[in-house]
Image (tube, helix red, strand yellow):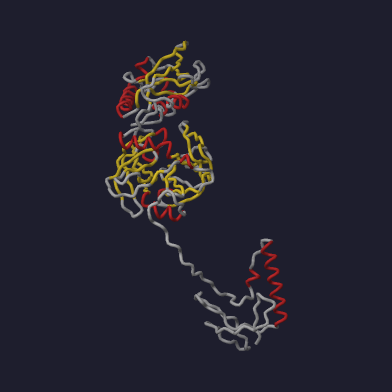
């Protein structure tokens, strides 16, 4: 019987027949069907093939190969080219030896592969679960749960996450990749920049290495490790830096500088680290866009639009929180405002109307009164609450700034020396707000304009809550 190599039309030497490992029994008419390996045994070889005419077979195979190549170029695939080979039906297994992963600490100079970044730092990442206690529309306290991510910043248990992950938390639990869990306490946070620090009672942890986010380029590969949906724990996603210095407006109207990335980011990823390939954290994963335009909404996704806070923007804040429990030097006015415009109040100019002014804090002490409309801070025009936040944040505690206010048909300029935002000033303002709320029950004009009758609107409090209200 003549054998041939179907992949070479010039082959003249017959191939030696191979012994079948599994052959079907001959049929009554003498024809033996091709052997099959029903178990997919590795190393299986096909037995003897049916006799064919040598010349015709070569032409047929050559035609099949031509058709296969043409089909492949045209998108038709290579199925025909695989037919008629020496081992039709055989299953082929690779024998590659996987390269070992480096799990030594990154030296920040040598580039790592994506698997190496994960292997080196997955034990530095944590899942965060919080129990939240809120008050519903009927004044009832309601308990719920939320989840996020974080990363270890010191060997003795300080962990960084997003402020919105732990905001309003009644309790916080941290879980590592080995399943070990710890209760955590809130050290402090900075809501305007969405960063917070929590602490667990542990030692000998593996902290991350902070990089320089100003050294990044668009197109560089980045990696994030987190807990999407709060269930798919310690998941890795990779992508590139899509844009730098992207100004993003959050749901409360405040703006924050972000790194844009196409890493897959979902609910539960918030607070996780964004690594470069040198194993350095260059950002804190914070948000993704939805079709509604709110980075924190749970609406339909817009793919490939994730955002992270540059680590350089919050590095000093993190150190401040660890050392002092809050960000030092932040200016604080001790007022609560709402935006006014021609639609909400046509008799007033555009600006931020003062609803509450705590008598013991700087704005009221300088002469700003409830009912005043702030229209400018220094040389910056103020048309609403968001502009007031941005204008105020351009200064430091202790600086004196001129506030332009409209009061009963007159414009006044009032010099205000900024207080520092800390637990004492925040508590003083919140205590006065509670007193104000009791004195201004239902039926007041401002209350009637509120979306929920009988409750003080959140915007009156600057959207902040203890211990970090906006103003």
In the rendered image, residue 329, in percent from the top left (x then y), is placed at 36, 28
In the rendered image, residue 207, in percent from the top left (x then y), is placed at 35, 47
Q: Nearer the viewer, residue 158 or 288?
A: 158
In the rendered image, residue 220, in percent from the top left (x then y), is placed at 51, 47
The quarter holding residue 140 reads top left
The quarter holding residue 425 reads top left
Q: Nearer the viewer, residue 303 or 381?
A: 381
Residue 91 vertical placement versus 163 (above, below)? below
The quarter of the rendered structure image containing the C terminus is top left
Q: Is residue 265 left or right of residue 103?
A: right
Quick check: can you spot residue 304? yes
Q: Nearer the viewer, residue 120 or 468?
A: 120
Question: How many marks on residues?
Answer: 0
Q: Is residue 8 left or right of residue 240?
A: right
Identified at 46% across, 31% down, the residue is: 254
The quarter holding residue 391 reads top left
Identified at 39% across, 53% down, the residue is: 120
In the rendered image, residue 415, in percent from the top left (x then y), is placed at 40, 16
Residue 194 vertical placement versus 224 (above, below)? above
The quarter of the rendered structure image containing the N terminus is bottom right
Identified at 34% across, 55% down, the residue is: 178
Quick check: can you spot residue 140? no
């Amino acid at each position: 019987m003549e054998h041939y190599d179907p992949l070479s039309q010039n082959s003249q030497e017959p191939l030696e027949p191979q012994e079948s490992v599994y052959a079907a029994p001959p049929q009554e008419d003498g024809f033996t069907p091709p052997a099959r390996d029903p178990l997919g045994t590795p190393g299986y070889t096909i037995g003897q093939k049916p006799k064919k005419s040598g010349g015709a077979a070569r032409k047929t195979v050559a035609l099949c190969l031509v058709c296969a190549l043409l089909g492949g170029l045209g998108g038709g695939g290579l199925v025909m080219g695989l037919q008629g080979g020496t081992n039709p039906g055989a299953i082929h297994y690779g024998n590659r030896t996987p390269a070992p992963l480096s799990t030594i600490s990154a030296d920040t100079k040598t580039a790592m592969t994506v698997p190496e970044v994960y292997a080196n730092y997955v034990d530095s990442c944590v899942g965060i679960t919080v129990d939240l206690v809120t008050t519903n529309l009927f004044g009832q306290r309601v308990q719920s749960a939320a989840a996020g991510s974080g990363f270890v910043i010191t060997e003795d248990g300080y962990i960084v996450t997003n402020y919105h992950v732990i905001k309003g938390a009644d309790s916080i639990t941290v879980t590592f990749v080995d399943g070990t869990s710890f209760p955590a306490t809130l050290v402090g946070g900075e809501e305007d920049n969405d960063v917070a620090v929590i602490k667990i009672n542990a030692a000998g942890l593996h902290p991350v290495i902070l990089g320089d986010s100003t050294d990044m380029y668009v197109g560089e590969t980045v990696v994030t490790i987190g807990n999407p949906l709060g269930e798919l724990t310690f998941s890795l996603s990779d992508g590139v830096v899509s844009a730098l210095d992207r100004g993003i407006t959050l749901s409360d109207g405040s703006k924050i500088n972000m790194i844009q990335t196409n890493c897959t980011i979902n609910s539960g990823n918030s607070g996780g680290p964004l690594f470069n390939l040198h194993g350095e954290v260059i950002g804190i994963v914070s948000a993704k866009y939805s079709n509604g335009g709110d980075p924190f909404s749970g609406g339909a996704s817009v793919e490939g639009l994730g955002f992270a806070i540059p680590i350089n923007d919050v590095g000093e804040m993190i150190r401040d929180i660890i050392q002092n429990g809050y960000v030092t030097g932040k200016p604080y006015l001790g007022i609560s405002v709402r935006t006014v415009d021609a639609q909400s109040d046509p008799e007033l100019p555009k600006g931020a109307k003062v609803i509450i002014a705590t008598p013991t804090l700087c704005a009221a002490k300088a002469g700003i009164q409830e009912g005043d409309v702030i229209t400018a801070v220094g040389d910056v025009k103020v048309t609403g609450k968001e502009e007031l936040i941005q204008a105020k944040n351009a200064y430091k505690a202790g600086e004196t700034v001129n506030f332009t206010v409209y009061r009963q048909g007159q414009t006044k300029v009032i010099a205000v020396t900024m207080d520092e935002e800390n637990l004492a000033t925040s508590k003083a303002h919140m205590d006065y707000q509670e007193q104000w709320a009791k004195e201004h029950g239902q039926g007041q004009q401002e209350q009637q304009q509120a979306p929920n009758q009988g409750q003080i609107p959140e915007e009156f409090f600057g959207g902040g809550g203890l211990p970090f209200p906006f103003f």
